[in-house]
Amino acid sequence: MPFDLLWILPLFLLAAVLYASVGHGGASAYLAILVLAGYARPEITSTVLILNILVTVTGFTNYFRAGHFNSRLIWPFILASIPAAYLGGMIPLSQPVFSGILGATLLIAGLRFLLFTKPILPRPPVEPRWIYGIGLPIGLVLGFLAGLIGIGGGIFLSPLLLLMGWADAKQTAAVSAAFIILNSLSGLAAHALHGTVHPGLAVPLGVTVLIGGQIGSWWGARKVPPAVLQQVLGAVLLSASLKMIHDLF
């Protein structure tokens, strides 16, 4: 039986604050919390994507208003990722396969937040042909994976943008937020065909993550460098990933 919602609301609030501070929606954390709390994955995917969209729209708005969004960076990725996310969302996964993929995703996300703690400055502007040559195939893969698992894919795009030197930390957060919103909408369209949304679950969690998302994104975009938050979030994600991977054996 699932745990009482009162026990998981603080976890959702914390996840929303931490994820939104770096431009993410928190879908991977929401999935992990609900699965570990006893909810079946097919019953929660659509709800999680809605929560992801709510938080990320809040985050994108704050980063956009702060002047960190670069529209030139988003197009190469979303042109391929949006249809790929829809296709990925049409493929049903067994619980062990889902847990394995989500556990690995959380592991990657945790390492991403733990490792990228120092500011990474962008390099000189990249020629458009290079951005599209790299962005289109990567967007295809990230979009499909995002739709398959039921997340937005920003946890994969963020380290790529930073490692390539195409954006600084706050520009990366803004672009990743836009990427997550569009992929989540595409994946939600597919999951809605064979999934359900439970108002009794979605409404209280939605209000909770909206509050957390507003706090985290405002702080990350305008106030404090999120290095400490990233380390805390990385530790939380690593713990959740190890728990899900352990449950497979």
Image: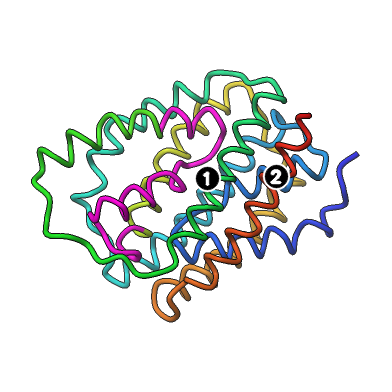
Q: Determine which residue is flagged by label 1.
A: 108
* In this picture, residue 210 sits left or right of residue 133: right
Give 156 or 68, whichever is nearer the viewer. Answer: 156
* In this picture, residue 71 sits left or right of residue 87: left
Residue 138 sits in which quadrant? top left
Give 160 or 153, whichever is nearer the viewer. Answer: 160
The residue shown at (66%, 58%) is: 236
Image position of 31 with respect to 98: above or below: below
Q: Determine which residue is flagged by label 2.
A: 242
Q: Which mark is residue 56?
A: none
Image position of 209 with respect to 28: above or below: below
Label 1: few (<14), some (14–19) or many (≥20) C-alpha neighbours in 10 Å: some
Residue 222 x, y percent position in the rendering: 39, 78
Task: Tell me which segment is drawn in magenta.
Answer: 143-172
Image position of 101 with respect to 230: above or below: above
Is residue 158 inside the magenta stretch?
yes
Residue 139 x, y percent position in the rendering: 33, 34
Give 169 or 12, whichever is nearer the viewer. Answer: 169
Image position of 227 with respect to 23: above or below: below
Give 193 or 246, whichever is nearer the viewer. Answer: 246
The residue shown at (10%, 38%) is: 129
Residue 110 x, y percent position in the rendering: 56, 53
Which amino acid, by three-letter code, is at mark 2?
Answer: Leu
Distance from the alpha carbon under mark 2 to that under mark 1? 11 Å
Residue 43 sits in which quadrant? top right
The residue shown at (44%, 67%) is: 117
Label 2: few (<14), some (14–19) or many (≥20) C-alpha neighbours in 10 Å: some
Q: Secondary structure at mark 1?
A: helix
Q: Quadrant of the N terminus?
A: top right
